[in-house]
Structures are given as C-alpha cells and as structure tokens.
Image (tube, rainbow, N blue to C red):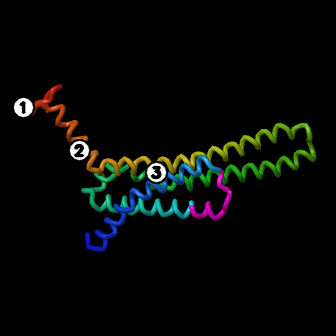
C-alpha cells in the first residue's frame, strides 16, 4: 500500500468513531422526533451519505488487508451488510406503496361515481396501503441501526480495553501447567 492509501486509511480509522456517534444521533433524531424542516432533512441525508462513504472506505481497506476473497467474506460479512443501501431499497418500496395508494385513490374516484356502496371497502384498502408505507419508513430507520451495530462491535474489538479483558479471561481459565480447567487446550 503506498503512502497516500496509508494516510487515507489512518484518516478513516480516526474518523470512524465519530461517524458512529453521528449515526447514533441521526438514528435517535429520526426515530423520536418528527423532522419537518427541509434543511435538516437535507443535512441528515448528506451526513448519512458521508457515513456510508466512510464505511465503504473502511471496508475497502479491510478487503485490501485480507488474505483472499473467501477470508474477506467469512470475516467481514456483517460489514458488507452494513454498507448495503437497505434504506434506499426501503424507500423504493415505500414509493411503490405510495404509487399503489395513489392509483387506488384514482380507482376509488371512478368507483364512487358508479357504485357508492363499494367505496367504503376500497378506502379501507387504501389506508392499509398507506400503513404499509409507514412500515417501510420504519424499516429504513432500522437499516441505519443495522449499520451502526457491526461497526461499533468492530471498534470495540480494536480497543485496548477489549484486548486486555479478552486475554485476562483466557488466562483465568488456564492454570500454570498449560491445561484448561475444563479440559485440554
């Protein structure tokens, strides 16, 4: 790896914990607050894109450092899932439901002219479609939570505290003869 990529890798590793904090703030803001301001929504989308870009760069460096493709997929599959644009897929699903709901509203308008008695059933069906769109919006937020978890686990595993706790736990189960208390090593 040349010097440029080493510098970029160092920058990505330094920025990664801050992106995790920013992602957590975005998740909390979108789940618990009804954000209507277009500027705030735009800032959230831009921040989300930046976070995904940092995760993709981190994944690219992990691929570069891995032994081979099988090792990469075996050890970093959760990171790969974290950068998939699940939110985009859920937004597409939400838009499909909205189009279906709008088409159903047009259909309802025609039916009302011809059969007033059937209109109540169709309105209930339309409300179910709109509820489905709300579910897709919730799943979009859930996808952001899914991106947050594996990166946080990777970050915690890389800290000195985790390493010290792991080795102290491992050494605690081994006596001085090199034999595990619960069986052979």
Q: Which residue in the protein does label 1 denote? A: 177
Q: State the SS at label 2.
A: helix
First reached walking from the N terminus: tag 1 or tag 3:
3
Query: Does residue 88 appear left or right of residue 172 in this picture?
Result: right
Where residue 166 is drawn, which disc sits there?
Answer: none
* Rendered location of residue 169, percent (x, y): 22, 36
**Magenta portion: prevailing SS class:** helix
Classify mark 1: helix, strand or loop.
loop
Q: Quarter of the image containing the C terminus?
A: top left
Number of other residues with Cα within 10 Å of mark 2, as a class: few under 14, some 14 to 19, many 20 or more = few
> At 88% from the left edge and 49% from the top edge, which residue is drawn?
110
Binning the other alpha carbons within 10 Å of mark 3 as few (below 14), some (14 to 19) or many (20 upward) gives many
Crowding at mark 1 (Cα within 10 Å: few <14, some 14-19, many 20+): few
User: Which comes before the other along the chain, label 3 or label 2?
Assistant: 3
Task: Judge depth for marks 3 and 2 and give the one in front.
Answer: 2
- Residue ranking furthest to the left: 177
**Coordinates of residue 184 in the picture (x, y in percent):** 13, 29
For image coordinates 72% across by 40% down, the residue present is: 128
Examine the rendered structure and indicate whether residue 166 appears above or below residue 54.
above
Residue at 29% over, 50% down:
159
Q: Is residue 141 left or right of residue 157?
A: right
Magenta stretch bounds: 34-43
Q: Magenta stretch containing residue 35, yes or no?
A: yes
Closest to the observer, 67 or 58: 58
Question: Which one is in front in this view, the residue at disc 1 or the one at disc 3?
Answer: 1
- The residue closer to the viewer here, 73 or 139, is 139
Q: Residue beneath label 2, please?
A: 164
Check residue 147 in the rendering and tell me which mark sits there, or answer none. Answer: 3
- First in sequence: mark 1 vs mark 2: 2
Q: Position of residue 133 (x, y in %)?
A: 67, 47
């Amino acid at each position: 790896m040349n010097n440029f990529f080493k510098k970029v890798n160092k920058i990505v590793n330094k920025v990664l914990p801050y992106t995790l904090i920013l992602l957590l703030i975005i998740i909390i803001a979108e789940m618990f607050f009804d954000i209507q301001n277009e500027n705030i929504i735009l800032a959230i989308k831009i921040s989300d894109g930046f976070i995904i870009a940092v995760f993709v760069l981190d994944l690219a460096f992990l691929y570069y450092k891995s032994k081979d493709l099988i090792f990469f997929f075996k050890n970093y599959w959760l990171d790969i899932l974290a950068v998939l644009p699940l939110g985009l897929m859920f937004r597409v699903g939400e838009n499909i439901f909205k189009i279906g709901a709008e088409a159903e509203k047009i259909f309802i308008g025609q039916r009302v002219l011809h059969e007033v008695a059937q209109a109540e059933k169709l309105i209930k069906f339309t409300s179910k479609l709109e509820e489905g769109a709300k579910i897709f919006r919730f799943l979009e937020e859930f996808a952001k939570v899914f991106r947050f978890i594996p990166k946080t686990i990777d970050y915690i595993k890389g800290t000195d505290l985790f390493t010290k706790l792991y080795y102290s736990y491992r050494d605690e189960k081994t006596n001085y003869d090199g034999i595990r208390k619960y069986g052979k090593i």
